[in-house]
Image (cartoon, rainbow, N blue to C red):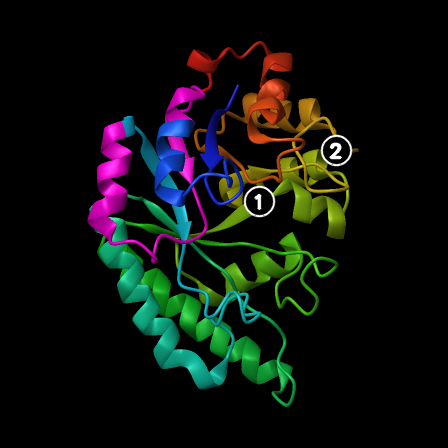
Amino acid sequence: MPVFAANLSFLWTELPFLDRFAAARDAGFSRVEYMFPYEHPAHEVRDRLDGAGLEQVLFNLPAGDWLAGDRGIAADPQRTDEFRAGVEQALDYAEVLEVEQLNCLAGLQLDGVELAEQRATLVGNVRFAARRLADQGLRLLVEPVNTYDVAGFLIPTTCDALRLLDDVGEVNVMLQFDAYHVQRMEGNPAARLDAVLDWVGHVQVADDPGRHQPGTGTIDFPALFAVLQHRGYQGSVGLEYIPEPDTARSLDWLEWYGLAPSERS
């Protein structure tokens, strides 16, 4: 079975963010991920990781003003300086947190801006980020996001993401594969994962409909995990789902695979 990483942006949200690290440890995890660390000094997050004996496997580059509706700024021609400053901020955090890969959210299609201009901006910014991360020996991920949940997202499918990787042309850029987003846009995530796994650097899971834990919807997770097992996937699988009815009870699905808490890592 793959190694699961608890996503602290989605799980234990009844707790303050910095208290979720200990909750993940107590639930049997050794790896965590989350969307953004930037509201807290890097050394405070490092202290929580160390105190809980956890490994940080992923977080996102700064993505603009999330509460105001930004979902990434990499494709906004007016915010290139902001994006590139965010890359430097993310690298500072990555050094302290010892993270080996960072995820880039492309952002939304913008009114009044030609799609070709946005696309060129995205390619240039992703190439810049990839080269800066390569200087530190890190990998950059690009994540497709479905346009039902996030209308107008610029990179909605794995095909779109792979075309972007081709255009960027940097060897340290890979695909972040989220089974929920793939199900919404393309269907049959297990088959799609098998087709693109050579380009996948990280996997995330949530079921559809509802974006809850595996077993609550229609995705064939045994088939998806079988692909990872058969193909020898060595990365983590992030649990980026909305727990139903709460985090503790949502983790029961792991027991279906014979995983006791001490075996989730």
The quarter of the image holding the C terminus is top left
- 114 lies above or below 103: below
Question: Is residue 170 covered in magenta?
Answer: no
Residue behind mark 2: 219
Badge 1 element: strand
Residue behind mark 1: 177
Residue 170 figure quarter: bottom left
Question: Is residue 41 covered in magenta?
Answer: yes
Closer to us: 21 or 33:
21
Closer to us: 210 or 1:
210
Q: In this picture, which residue range is highlighted in magenta?
A: 24-51
- How crowded pointer 1 is (Cα within 10 Å; few <14, some 14-19, many 20+) is rated as many
Disc 1 marks which amino acid? Phe
- How crowded pointer 2 is (Cα within 10 Å; few <14, some 14-19, many 20+) is rated as many
Q: Is residue 78 left or right of residue 151?
A: left
Residue 81 figure quarter: bottom left
Judged by depth in the image, the label closer to the viewer, 1 or 2, is 2
